[in-house]
Image: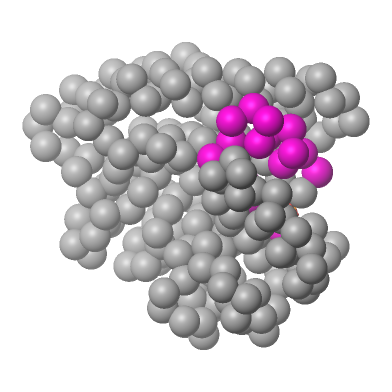
Amino acid sequence: MSVSSYQNILDILKPYGSRLVAVSKTKSVEEIRELYNQGQRDFGENYVQELMEKETALPKDIRWHFIGHLQTNKVKFIAPFIYMIQSVDSLKLLHEIDKQAAKNQRVIFCLLQIFIAREETKFGMNETELDSLIITVNQNRQNEKFSHSLISGCMGMASLTENQALIHDEFKRLREIFEKIKTSFPSDPVDTLSMGMSSDYLIALEMGSSMVRIGSLIFGKR
Ligand SMILES: *Cc1c(COP(=O)(O)O)cnc(C)c1O
């Protein structure tokens, strides 16, 4: 863990008002605790089993963000403690999150994961899927469903490329989608545009990111 690069990132984020999620997947409890001792409270994880073990071992005031692909049948394991699920990519998953959050008498903040990259391998919804989700959730809201899963915004990953202009355009599109989500869910706390990782967070900040997810730049290579 590099304290100087951590502080440096915080200094860069400050004028943008952007928040940092420290992505700690594959990193040890000791490494996470070291960053926690520097004041970091938001951590991102990709795997359910790994997250559960870390949650048990670490302080309870950590806000855990789930950022990996989440299977519906695993939501129940993280529902008792997860702060935000950034990888909501289907109505079915949102339904299950709402159900499990209600069971635990909690609210779970949700980001809709949007597919913006060129690669085929990235998860997320396209705009057509997003539009149909918006319609269904708003219909159900009138029957008081989805009151335990609050839509806070969206998350996306740009293409893995050296082409800065392409990354720029993909983030610009995500910001436009974020604006659409904001107007589509007027009663939700839609304030989070999660975009930018170690390699592209400077471009993301320029394009209006309010939350960056940074792993290797803080913790070193995985
Ligand atoms: C691993 C991961 C990150 C962090 O990637 P780095 O390149 O290490 O900063 C960010 N977002 C998601 C969704 C990830 O899976």
Magenta-colored span: 199-215
Toward the right, the furthest residue is 162
Toward the front, the furthest residue is 15
63 vs 4, left or right, is left
* Residue at horizontal 51 percent and vertical 36 percent from the top: 193
147 vs 182, left or right, is left
Q: Is residue 32 visible?
A: no
Specify the color scheme: one colour
Where in the figure is residue 127, as x and y percent of width and height? Answer: 50, 17
Front residue of this view, candidates 23 and 126: 23
Q: Quadrant of residue 100?
A: bottom left
Q: Quadrant of the N terminus?
A: bottom right
Vertical relation: 151 (above or below) 174: below
Q: Is residue 183 visible?
A: yes
Where in the figure is residue 111, as x and y percent of width and height? Answer: 44, 40
Residue 168, magenta (yes or no): no
Q: Quadrant of the C terminus?
A: bottom right
* Residue at horizontal 18 percent and vertical 29 percent from the top: 140
Residue 206, magenta (yes or no): yes
Q: Quadrant of residue 31?
A: bottom right
* Residue at horizontal 32 percent and vertical 67 percent from the top: 80
Where in the figure is residue 131, as x and y percent of width and height? Answer: 40, 16
Vertical relation: 161 (above or below) 60: above
Q: Quadrant of residue 203?
A: top right
Front residue of this view, candidates 133 and 199: 199
* Residue at horizontal 19 percent and vertical 62 percent from the top: 105
Where in the figure is residue 41, as x and y percent of width and height? Answer: 51, 68
Number of callouts: 0
